Amino acid sequence: GLHALVEGEKPSPCRCSRLTPHNRKNCGFPGITSEQCFDLGCCFDSSVAGVPWCFHPLPNQESEQCVMEVSARKNCGYPGISPEDCASRNCCFSNLIF
């Protein structure tokens, strides 16, 4: 199906982090910066060599269940944050400890 991204809207972390490196679909060009990539509404991750660093995010419906390895999580909230406040920060909420 087709899905449109709002230009300049950085995708949520879930839409980027749940995509395995070998499944990335290139969204940029060689030498693209993270800012240029985000301006295209795409994900940027330069930690894996040999795969696109600027890549299309997962469609929204595929990333609504935000499941991610604990080791891959980065805190972007505070103790007691609500799921709604967390989502408003474009972050993933989970109260599960794996």
Image (cartoon, rainbow, N blue to C red):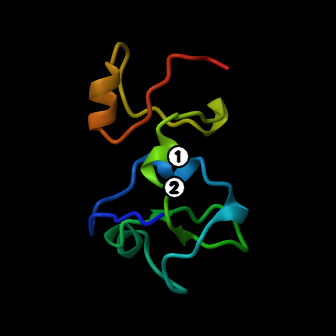
- What count of labels does the image hold? 2
Can you tell which quarter of the image residue 68 is in? top right
Q: Which of the numbered marks, if any, corresponds to residue 58?
A: 2
Which residue was labeled with disc 1?
Answer: 62
User: At 43% from the left edge and 76% from the top edge, which residue is drawn?
Assistant: 33
Relative to residue 90, is residue 66 drawn left or right? right
Compare residues 14 and 4 and report the one nearer the observer: 4
Amino acid at dot 2: Leu
The spot of residue 53 in percent (x, y) is: 57, 70
Q: Marks 1 and 2: in contact by CB < 8 Å?
A: yes
Can you tell which quarter of the image residue 89 is in? top left
User: At 27% from the left edge and 64% from the top edge, which residue is drawn?
Assistant: 6
The spot of residue 58 in percent (x, y) is: 51, 55
The spot of residue 36 in percent (x, y) is: 36, 75
Spatial separation of the CA atoms under disc 2 and disc 1 = 6 Å
In the depicted structure, whether residue 73 falls above or below residue 62: above
Instruction: Report helix, strand or loop for mark 1.
Output: helix
Determine crowd level at label 1: few under 14, some 14-19, many 20+ residues with C-alpha closer than 10 A.
Answer: few
Determine crowd level at label 2: few under 14, some 14-19, many 20+ residues with C-alpha closer than 10 A.
Answer: many
Relative to residue 25, is residue 80 drawn left or right? left
Q: What quarter of the picture does the C terminus occupy?
A: top right
Q: Which of the numbered marks, if any, corresponds to residue 79?
A: none
User: At 33% from the left edge and 34% from the top edge, which residue is drawn?
Assistant: 87
The spot of residue 46 in percent (x, y) is: 58, 66
Amino acid at dot 1: Glu
Compare residues 47 and 12 and report the one nearer the observer: 12
